[in-house]
Amino acid sequence: MDVVDGFYKYNRGFGEDSRISRMWPTLKLIEHFKEADLNKFYFTDGLYSAISIPERLSNAVAAAPEFRDIEDSECIILKDKNPDPTSSVKQVPIDYRDTRNTKRMRKELTAYNALLVRSHIDLGSLTKAYVEVRHQSRIRENKKSQKLHGKDKWAPSKLFKRIPVNQSIKFTTRQFANASWKQGGRFYGGWWQRIPSEHRPDIRINNTPTIEVDYSGHHPVLLYAAVAHINYWSEIGGDVYDIPKADFFRSNLDLKGKARKAANRQCLKYLVLMLINAKSEEDAFGGLQAAYQGTAS
């Protein structure tokens, strides 16, 4: 390491002449890191290694790694409708005045982000630093393009996307919508929120296996409690999405048995969640038809 000692010197009325101590990696140390084959996967939020920006490194001009304290990043975000109607981004962050509640939420979430910085979270089954998944929106666009134009919009190689799995994608925010602290409030950030459910059993925290608690039928069960004052599990029980007379595939005679039952359950689940979140019944049914692209009848 190259070290330059700092010093303190105060000149009244003539400015500050003090300097902090500085340390730079030598090229020899950099070569050792290169041989160790370290990459972004090993570095956590807020710490960007100078190894990843070699153009800034030399014996003549060296730069210290950048460090961004997590407390400098806003984690409580209030959004409102985008004033630009042509933009695909529906909600954009807006300024707001702090209240006792926002300060409390920020304090709690900052502590959580600090814990994430100190924790190594990865997938034990991965051989590469990403998860590859099907790009569902592009697949739907291809189907639509085939019907309208007789050709695909996207090439086969573009029908997959990679979700990075590393220690730099962990910073979490809590986001509210429509300029209201009563709408939204979900947490966004960690790469583990974006990976398919089949990969989640492989998540390791500090090399320790984890489990995921599944709250079955969470939204309908909450509605039973809030509106009807019914404890669903003790008073009714069973699969909340299992309604025998619900049949979305009457015109599809090829779908039978367990496959038909599973497909109906999935459709009913989508419809219930859309009815809860949509502005109107028309929006909910329209969303269901868009999701299944004419499969449901």
Image (cartoon, rainbow, N blue to C red):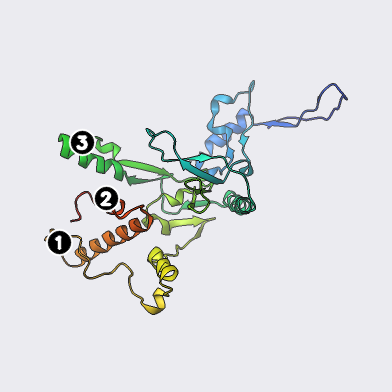
Mark 3 is on which residue type? Asp
Residue 111: % across, % down: 62, 53
Q: State the residue position of label 2.
A: 286
Q: Position of residue 61 (x, y in %)?
A: 63, 22
Callout in the foreground (2, 1): 2
Give the label, 1 or 3, closer to the camera: 1
Residue at the image point whose x is 78% and y is 30% from the top: 6
Quadrant where the image shows the C terminus: bottom left
Callout 2, which amino acid? Answer: Gly
- Label 2 vs 1, first from the N-terminus: 1
Q: Secondary structure at mark 3?
A: loop
> What kind of residue is marked 1?
Arg
* Residue indicated by mark 3: 152
* Image side of residue 242 versus residue 127, left or right: left
Numbered disc 1: secondary structure: loop
Residue 178 to residue 209: above or below: above
**Identity of the residue drawn at 58% across and 25% down:** 56
Q: Quadrant of the N terminus?
A: top right
Neighbours of disc 3 within 10 Å: few (<14), some (14-19), many (20+): some
Q: Nearer the viewer, residue 24 or 271?
A: 271
Question: Can residue 48 be seen in this snapshot?
Answer: yes
294 left or right of 287?
Answer: left
Q: Which mark is residue 250?
A: 1
Query: Is mark 1 in CB contact (under 8 Å) with mark 3?
Result: no
Residue drawn at 83 percent across, 30 percent down? 8
212 lies above or below 138 = below
Estimate the spatial distance between the alpha carbons at disc 2 and disc 1, rounded to whole Å. Answer: 19 Å
Is residue 231 left or right of 174 when viewed as pictured? left
